[in-house]
Image (cartoon, rainbow, N blue to C red):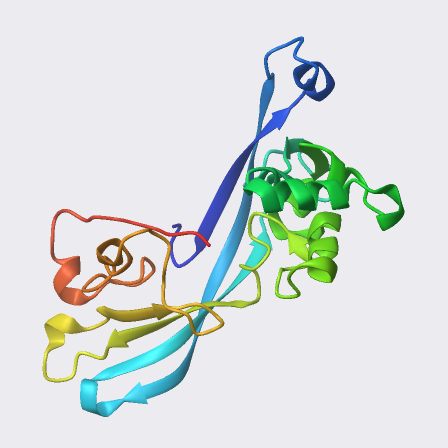
Amino acid sequence: IQGDNLFISFFIFNLTNKEEFLAGHERAELQKVGPITYSFEVLRQIIDEDPENNSLTYWNKRNHYFSRQLTDPNIDPKTTMVTYPNLPKIQILTAGKIGSFADTIFSIPWLGGDDDTQDLFVTKTIDEFLWGYDHDLLQLGRKLFDSSLPPKYGLLSDQNATHTYSYTVKNGKDKPEELLQIVDIRDVTGKPLTCWNSEKANLSYLKSTDIEQVSPKKFRRKKFSYSYFES
């Protein structure tokens, strides 16, 4: 945070000896690439108000903007290439019998697969790695198995200029100490947060606040506890 501006920086570990590593001849050699920095703004759209429970529900929407000044001068996200694990491919391989069958299907040349469907590591631009690209494995998966699969893969492919999660929070009426306390979190399909394996863990956000806004009572505390989740 700098003044009123929010920034996020990334460092990527680039595999520089892919062929030798996959052949088992060498250990992985990783090159630290970064920082790659973006400023971002958070927009909130109120979608519901509940006067009886003194709460309101809003969408979070983030817009990211590349910061040339705060990024390594030798890096251009649109042209700098990085090699990294092909996570959709790895997830298929670890899916047991279904994964074995899918992997066999995806290896058939006439289906049009390229490196995305074949290799355990792929090489893409930083822009593609972060913000997504059309992934052949996911495209084929949509056609053959599950049409709800996303067509793109990227670390933050669903985090830029899109609604992510809806938050229901207390509005502080009658109880100012409850202002901004989270009551519920749901994804874009309306499903409740289920990042962890236990209900207790999945409800751990109760009485906490969105990381980008803190209630006045909590702000007076000297110590803070931070947590995050990823989809």
Where is 75 relative to 163, above or below? above
Q: Is residue 53 in view?
A: yes
Where is 17 relative to 160, above or below? above
Residue nearest the observer in this picture, 44 or 50: 50
Residue extending farthest to the bottom is: 51
Q: Is residue 77 in view?
A: no
Residue visible at 78% across and 40% down in the picture:
107
6 relative position to 110: left or right: left
Residue visible at 50% across and 58% down in the picture:
40
Residue nearest the observer in this picture, 105 or 148: 105
Which quadrant holds residue 191? bottom left
161 relative position to 165: left or right: right
Residue visible at 29% across and 71% down in the picture:
184
On the image, the x and y values in percent for residue 119 come to 72, 33
Q: How many marks?
A: 0
Residue nearest the observer in this picture, 94 or 112: 94
Residue extending farthest to the top is: 25
On the image, the x and y values in percent for residue 88 come to 62, 44
Residue nearest the observer in this picture, 39 or 113: 113
Which quadrant holds residue 90? top right
Residue extending farthest to the right is: 110
Residue visible at 11% across and 53% down in the picture:
221
On the image, the x and y values in percent for residue 226 come to 26, 49
